[in-house]
């Protein structure tokens, strides 16, 4: 395990970067032109980034990026 100490400004910047990355991945996951194998890799990365974001964000903010596993399984 690795630990970091961030000041308030750095936390806000990290929050912003993680949200933008999650937005981009959600956009790509909804793109019909992207191959399912690539989407699988994006999904795997999404889970890691989401867990990082969940450590910084409030439950209300986290709910904006939570994905329904059952819905995703049905789409495949």
Image (spheres, rainbow, N blue to C red):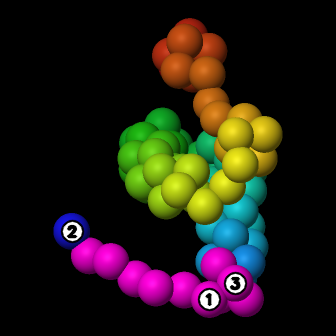
| Alpha-carbon span between mark 2 and mark 1 | 20 Å
Q: Quadrant of the N terminus?
A: bottom left
In the rendered structure, does residue 30 fall within the stretch colored magenta?
no
- Answer yes or no: do the residues labelled 2 and 3 have beta carbons within 8 Å? no
Query: Can you tell which quarter of the image residue 63 is in?
Result: top right
* Residue 43 can be seen in this image: yes
Provide the secondary structure element on which disc 2 rests.
loop
The residue pinned by badge 1 equals 7
The residue pinned by badge 3 equals 8
Picture coordinates of residue 6, whole percent (x, y)? 54, 86
Main secondary structure found in the magenta portion: loop
Other residues around mark 3 within 10 Å, as few (<14) / some (14–19) / many (≥20): few
| Between discs 2 and 3, the one toward the N terminus | 2
Instruction: Name the front one of labels 2 and 1.
Output: 1
Provide the secondary structure element on which disc 1 rests.
loop
| Alpha-carbon span between mark 2 and mark 3 | 22 Å
Seen in the picture, residue 8 relative to 25 is either above or below; the reply is below
In the rendered structure, does residue 8 fall within the stretch colored magenta?
yes
Picture coordinates of residue 28, whole percent (x, y)? 67, 51
Seen in the picture, residue 63 relative to 39 is either above or below; the reply is above
The residue pinned by badge 2 equals 1
Left or right of residue 75: residue 2: left
Which stretch did the figure color magenta?
2-11
Q: Image point 48% across, 37% down: which residue?
A: 36
Seen in the picture, residue 16 relative to 13 is either above or below; the reply is above
Q: Image point 57% across, 51% down: which residue?
A: 54
């Amino acid at each position: 395990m690795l630990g970091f100490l961030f000041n308030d400004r750095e936390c806000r910047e990290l929050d912003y970067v993680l949200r933008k990355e999650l937005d981009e991945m959600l956009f790509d996951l909804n793109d019909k032109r992207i191959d399912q194998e690539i989407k699988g890799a994006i999904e795997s990365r999404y889970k890691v980034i989401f867990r990082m974001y969940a450590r910084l964000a409030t439950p209300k903010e986290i709910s904006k990026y939570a994905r329904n596993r059952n819905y995703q399984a049905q789409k495949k």
